[in-house]
Structures are given as structure tokens and as C-alpha cells.
Amino acid sequence: MDESSDITQLLQRHHRGDREAFDRMVPLVYERLRIIARGQLARAGRRGQTLDTTALVQEAYLQLVDVDSVDWQDRGHFFAICARAMRRILVDYARHRQAAKRGGGIAPLTLEADMVAADSESELVLAIDDALRGLEAFNERLARVVECRYFAGMTEEETARALDSSLRTVQRDWMRARAWLLKALA
């Protein structure tokens, strides 16, 4: 049996209530989760952040470990959900930074160059999240393709399997989604 089917079986066992199945699966997926987290952190910018790759993976794990209501389809579906959880964590983190920037009950202090860069990175994360939420309202399938391709780093083939779509549909959706997001972010 290959690793992919092992992961799928463990996900299905977790869904049926086997709490230990998720913990047994983690070593099989950990390195891929770190790759996804590294990619998301790189896109979000890392200057001045206390959140690192390991912390992001752990936060996503904590959000997903007790979720047995998700009917995990396979490993691709799992990675897509993990990427979504990581994106939400980064968005929450960026919102927190923006609130702190606007006062957040803290006494004013002088700005330094790296603080401005971190704030603009938070603004970019929030702008991307707003655009993705707009895309989701326009067409949810396009938003799922973006999550798989951009945030989870999946190939077109992996995305097609995760979304139970044809390869050609994913390719078309990826082109449409990128065009929509470019226009929304312009």
C-alpha cells in the first residue's frame, strides 16, 4: 500500500471517530505541510513576524485535530483544507497586526523601517484575503482552485483530484481565477 492510500485510510478512520488515526497520519504529511506553510509565509512576507513555519503548521494542526465533521476525500482534499486553515491563520494574524498598528490599546511609539514593511505585508495579506472572498462570492469553485494551486502549492492534476474535476476544467478555472484576482487587486 502506498503512502497516499495510507493517508486516505487514516483520514477516513478519523472521520469515523478514531482520534488516534489523525495523530498517526501527521508524520506522513508533516513535511508537505511545512512546504505549504513555507510557501504561504513567503507570499505573506516574514519580516518582523513571530509566526514561523513550525508555528503555522502547529496552529493548523490544532484547528483540524478535533474536526471529525469533515468527510475527508483523500490526501489532496486534506492538503487543500490545511492550506485554507493556514491562510485563515495568516489573515487573523495580519488583522491582529493591523489592529495593533491602529492603537489596539498600546501607547504610541516611533516607527522604524522594518515596522512599516511588516505593516504593508499585513495589508497585502488582507487585500488578498478580501479579493479571494470576493472571488468566492462570485464563483466558489474558482476560489477552491486558487486555494489548491496558490496556497497549497498543488499541481493541476492534484487540484483536479482534490476538487473532483477534470484537468481541463481546473486549467480553465485557474486562468479565470487569476484574471479575476488581478483585476480585483489592481
Image (cartoon, rainbow, N blue to C red):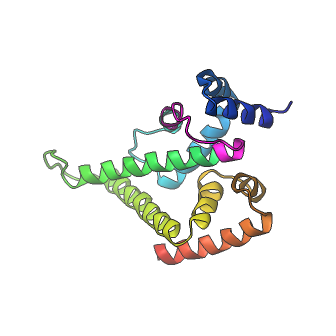
Q: Is residue 173 left or right of residue 6?
A: left
Q: What count of labels does the image hold?
A: 0
Residue 105 appears in the picture as rendered: yes
Say if 24 sits above or below 115 in the image.
above
Above or below: residue 112 compared with residue 3: below
Relative depth, front residue between 38 and 16: 16
* Residue occupying image coordinates x 68% and y 29%: 13
Q: Is residue 116 part of the magenta span, yes or no?
A: no
Question: Where residue 39 sits: x, y (%)?
Answer: 58, 49
Residue at the extreme top of the image, as rendered: 20
How far across and how far down the image is residue 21, in percent?
A: 65, 25
Q: Nearer the viewer, residue 8 or 118?
A: 8
Task: State which quadrant residue 2 falls in.
Answer: top right
Residue sitting farthest toward the left: 107
Residue 9, percent from left and from top: 74, 32
Q: Residue at x 48, y 53 (%)?
A: 44
Question: Where are the magenta residues, as a range?
Answer: 60-78
Quarter of the rendering occupied by the N terminus: top right
Of residues 143 and 46, the one drawn nearer to the viewer in this rendering = 143
Asked whether residue 38 appears in the rendered view, the answer is no
- Residue 111 spot, x, y in % from top left: 24, 53
Q: In this picture, is 185 found above or below 127?
A: below
Q: Is residue 166 left or right of residue 122?
A: right
The residue lying at 51 percent from left, 45 percent from top is: 86
Q: Which residue does the image show at 47% across and 72% down from the upper left?
A: 185
Q: Is residue 117 left or right of residue 106?
A: right
